[in-house]
Image: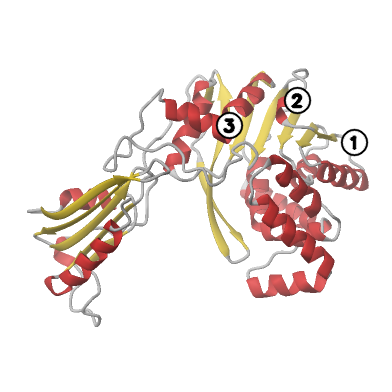
Amino acid sequence: MPRESSDEIRTTLHALEAHLAWWGLRQFTSDGAYFQWQRETLSSENLTTLHRQVEQKRRGSAADEIAFYDATAHPNILPVLYSQRYDYYLAIGLRVADRIGEARTILDVGCGVGILTTFYARQHPDKTFVGIDRSPVSILRAQERAQALGQTNVRFDCLDLEHIASNPSYDLILATHALVQAEQDPGLPSRSWNSFERVRESPQQADFEGRTGIGVRLDCLSARLSINGRMILFEKTRQLARRIPLQRAVAARGFDLIEQPELIRYRLVEEVADDGPLYLLGRGISHPLRWDETPEPDEGCPFDPTKLESGSADPEAPLYENHWPSAQIVWEQLREKKVLQETTWQEPDGRQLHVELGQAAEGIYLYCANTLDQRQLVLVGPTSRVMLESYYREIASGEP
C-alpha cells in the first residue's frame, strides 16, 4: 500500500492542525497554562458538572461512562476537555489518514464527538464514513459538526458495536481506544515470576476476553469486515500482560499483521502517554508478519561489571539499578550468586511476586519480579548492605 511522502505528511499535518482549531481545540505543553484556560473558559457550573461526571465514570459502569461522555460533549466543555488529547489526535490522525488507502467504506468505532472522523471525511470526500458511539449527545454533536462542514460522505449513529447491522460490510474498520473497556485490567499473567511466557489456550485468556469485552467486540468487527478488508486497531495495551492476550484474541479470529506494530508516545499536556501498539490487520494475508510476544526493547542500563558506579558522592548510591524487563537478564548473569533470603507469594489479583536478597561477585543485590512482567534489580557495595536488607524486609512484609 503506497504511503504519503514527507511533503504529503506535512500537508496532512497542517490540515489536521487547522481541523482541530476549527473544533476549538488548543495545544498546551504546560499544565498551568491549560488549567488557567480551563478556569477562564468554563463556568463554575460547567466545572462542577465535569468533576462530578469524572468521579462517577471511575465507578466503571457503562451508564456512568455514557453519562460522562454526554456531559463532555456540551459545546462549552468539549473544546476544553478534548484539548487535553490534542497530541493524541495528531499522532493517531496522521497515522490513520496515511493508511486509509483504497478503502471505499470506513467504519469508525467509538468515534466520540467525531473529531477525527470528520477529519478523515474531509481528507477523502470520495469515500463513505460511518461513525458509531454509545453516547447520544456525542453523536448529536458529531452530526451537527458534520453538517456545519457540509459533509455528505459521513454518517453518525448512536449505537453499540453489537447492534450494527451486518450488512453492508466495510473495507476498513477503525477502532482506536474503543474495544478494551477495562483500562485498569492487569492482563494475562506469565507462567511464573521468572518468565515472560504465557500459557496458550488457557482459561485466563478466555477470562481476559470476557471481562474486557474484547472477545465479543472482535467477533462483531470480524462479521462486519469485507472479505479483503483491513482493520486499524489501537488500544491501551502497551504492557506485555495486556498486549499478548489482545494479540491472541485478534489472531484467533483470523486476523494477520500487515505491518510491524507501532508503539506510540504522545502528550496529555505535561503527562507523557506510552500507548499502543497501533496494528494494521487483514485476513488471508499471503506473507503476514509474526506476532511478537517478547518484552519491548527497554531503557534498562547496560550491565558492565568493570564499570559499576563507584566513588559516588553519595555513599549509599547503588552500584547498579534497573527497573526494566532487562533486569532479569542481568540478574541471571550475576557471578557466584548466593541467595541470602527470598520469598514468593500470591497477590489477591492473581500476581505471583518474588523478592530475593543475595550476594554475588559484583556486590549485594536485591531482585524483585512478578508475573505481570515487572522487574527490578538493585546492586550495592558492602557498606550499603544494611540498607538493602531493610528494603528487602519492607517489600517482603507485603506478603499476606
Q: Residue at x 78, y 36 (%)?
A: 131
N-terminal of the pair, mark 1 or mark 2, is: 1
Q: Does residue 305 sit above or below 224 in this rendering?
A: below
The reply to whether callout 1 and callout 2 are in contact (CB within 8 Å) is no
Residue receiving disc 2:
163
Q: Along the horizontal axis of the image, is 334 left or right of 8? A: left
Numbered disc 2: secondary structure: helix
> Dot 1: few (<14), some (14–19), or many (≥20) neighbours within 10 Å?
few
Mark closer to the observer (1, 2): 2
Numbered disc 3: secondary structure: helix
Numbered disc 1: secondary structure: loop
Q: Residue at x 44, y 35 (%)?
A: 244
Residue closest to the far bottom: 313
Residue 290 in view (yes/no):
no
Relative image position of residue 73 (x, y in whole percent): 81, 52
Quarter in which the N terminus is drawn: top right
N-terminal of the pair, mark 3 or mark 2, is: 2
Q: Which mark is residue 214?
A: 3
> Dot 3: few (<14), some (14–19), or many (≥20) neighbours within 10 Å?
many
Q: Amino acid at mark 2?
A: His
Q: Which mark is residue 127?
A: none
Relative image position of residue 149 (x, y in whole percent): 90, 47
Q: Does residue 120 sit above or below 49 in this rendering?
A: above
CA gap, disc 1 to disc 2?
23 Å
N-terminal of the pair, mark 3 or mark 1, is: 1
Q: Residue at x 48, y 25 (%)?
A: 288
Residue receiving disc 1:
152
